[in-house]
Amino acid sequence: MADFLGFLTTFLLLVLIINVIIRKMVRKYKFKLNPLLSINSKISKYHKLLALAVLILGTVHGYLIVGLRLVPHTGSILLLSVLIMFLLFISGKYGHYKSWFIKHKIFYYVVLVALFLHIFFKNIIS
Ligand code: HEM
Ligand code: HEM
């Protein structure tokens, strides 16, 4: 179950990441009238929901493996980065924290690295 949740969370995170990459490419290269782009803009509407699912499922997956202990692990770093992205959004929306978005975009790269490490070099810390 824990492994299945890990893979499901990874799948959702990859959908989120690919969606963002296509969005960035569309802005840069100004593609037009491609059916793929309309699918991508539909997925964009679920950005928050996908990220929230990653946060919840990632927490359950981690809980099933290590319980409530706060262990230093590549998985904890990944989950913490997604949590920070969520908190940045909340601080922008409800706390009028203006630079939330730029920091959200910076943490996107932290998530990329943390996901890579958690999948391919799971136990480099601990
Ligand atoms: C967004 C959050 C997370 C994602 C996407 C994720 C993804 C995954 C995936 C896909 C695997 C299976 C890899 C494999 O079998 O090769 C895995 C395993 C593992 N994850 Fe996570 N994980 C997340 C959060 C966490 C957290 C918070 C912890 C706990 C500190 C954690 C600890 C572990 C451990 C110890 C394994 C190895 C389990 C085993 O070998 O049976 N993960 N994770
Ligand atoms: C629950 C957590 C999250 C919330 C509430 C959230 C919310 C948002 C919002 C409101 C925006 C601006 C509007 C939009 O482009 O849709 C945005 C943009 C963005 N988000 Fe998130 N997000 C979350 C998690 C994530 C995660 C986990 C990633 C990394 C994969 C991510 C990557 C990005 C990026 C790169 C942008 C800028 C997109 C662009 O340049 O067009 N977000 N996010």
Image (spheres, helix red, strand yellow):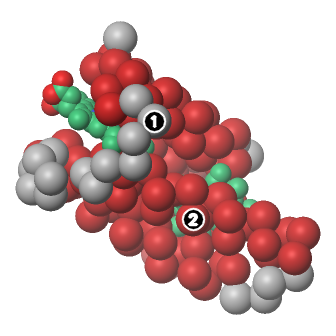
Q: Quadrant of ligand 2?
A: bottom right
User: Who's the residue at 47% across and 57% down the image?
Assistant: 80
| Label 2 CA crowd tier, 10 Å (few <14, some 14–19, many 20+) | some
Amino acid tagged 1: Leu
Direction from residue 125 to residue 10 in the image, left or right: right
Give residue 84's mark. 2
Report if the beta carbon of the residue with label 2 is closer than 8 angstroms to ligand 2: no
Camera-side residue: 56 or 115?
Answer: 56
Quadrant location of the N terminus in the rendered image:
top left
- Vertical relation: 102 (above or below) 89: below
Direction from residue 107 to residue 52 in the image, left or right: right
User: Who's the residue at 28% across and 20% down the image?
Assistant: 3
Question: Percent position (x, y) of residue 43?
Answer: 63, 41
Disc 1: which residue = 68
Camera-side residue: 39 or 3?
Answer: 3
Camera-side residue: 21 or 94?
Answer: 94
Q: Marks 2 and 1: which is nearer the front?
A: 1
Q: Secondary structure at mark 2?
A: helix
Report if the beta carbon of the residue with label 1 is closer than 8 angstroms to ligand 1: no
Amino acid tagged 2: Ile
